[in-house]
Amino acid sequence: MGVLISLLAGLVAVVLGMGAAAVRAKQLDKAAVVDVAWGAGFVLVALAAAVVGTALDDGTGWRRWLVAAMVAAWGLRLAWHIRGRAVGEHGGKEDPRYAEMLGGPPSEIGMTTVVRRVFLVQGVVQWFVALPVMVGAVLTVEWWPVVVAGVLVWATGLFFEAVGDRQLAAYKEQPRETRPQVMDRGLWRYSRHPNYFGDACIWWGLWLAAGLASGWVAGLATVLCPAAMTYFVYQVTGVKLLEKTMMQRPGYPAYAARTSSFFPLPPKKA
């Protein structure tokens, strides 16, 4: 019963978060607002599950709030980092990714279409990916060393994502005339997308800490969640999507030839 209530509470949190984001998207005429709601929405889900677990007095309390803190540290940082790109960049116009996907801004195609094709889809994915967090909030820790392993994997992911984002931001702040053609320094020397690699590690770490640490049943029942997140950031919304445009930029094909696309590896010799 506790698991079901936690899942329902998480669903309500997703609906409220995406609903508020849709209202803001209509105000700004930008579907890209959903990118901010992506990270922030996971925080709402984690807090809702933690409150339910505490109210029902189910599960392991210290793990419940540890996982909620891990999700909050990742989600709030991501939402804060991405807010400028989602709302302030592109000359006040829609993010090109969403403009291409939808065929225009919300004012032209209608919010019903935007909600159905963007907010509803991402809301469903968000709830599914967060299943380990919601389940772990009301279950007892069976193997505490797995929680430790999860925290270490999560910390590795947060490092790659946060440092990678900061290094890329510093690169973009340099004058276009004097900066290198491509960003191939720091973590970007070893991976073309260290931030997406970090994002995948974040969710495998949370699965270890909240899912597998609760036992084999919970672990197997939720293992598709981090796998789905990894698939999306690599094959759908992240690496593959960016590579289509990046390959057209001067110097990028040569950079791609010597640098791993996802997993950090030593660069190949020319």
Image: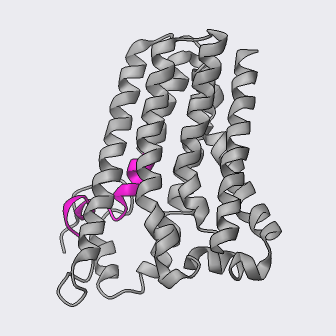
Residue 140 position within the rendered picture, expressed as x and y whole percent measured from the top left? 56, 10
Q: Is residue 58 above or below residue 237?
A: above
When asked about the image quadrant of residue 227, the answer is top right
Viewport quadrant of the N terminus: top right
Q: Residue furthest front?
A: 27
Residue 184 position within the rendered picture, expressed as x and y whole percent measured from the top left? 23, 70
Q: Which residue is located at x 78 percent, y 79 percent?
A: 109
Q: How is the image coloured?
A: one colour
Q: Residue furthest right?
A: 112
Q: Is residue 201 above or below residue 213?
A: below
When asked about the image quadrant of residue 119, the answer is bottom right
Q: Main secondary structure of the magenta part?
A: helix
Viewport quadrant of the C terminus: bottom left
Viewer-closest of 11 and 146: 11
Residue 27 position within the rendered picture, expressed as x and y whole percent measured from the top left? 67, 69
Q: On the picture, is 203 further left or further right than 171?
A: right
Q: On the picture, is 16 further left or further right than 216?
A: right
Residue 30 visible in the displayed image: no
When asked about the image quadrant of residue 100, the answer is bottom right
Viewer-closest of 6 and 241: 6
- Please say whether residue 63 is one of the residues in the magenta stretch: no
Q: Which residue is located at x 42 percent, y 21 percent?
A: 147
- Please say whether residue 189 is one of the residues in the magenta stretch: yes
Q: Is residue 261 above or below residue 43?
A: below
Residue 56 visible in the displayed image: yes
Q: Which residues are magenta?
A: 184-200
Q: Which residue is located at x 51 percent, y 68 percent?
A: 86
Q: Which residue is located at x 80 percent, y 69 percent?
A: 113
Residue 84 position within the rendered picture, expressed as x and y whole percent measured from the top left? 44, 67
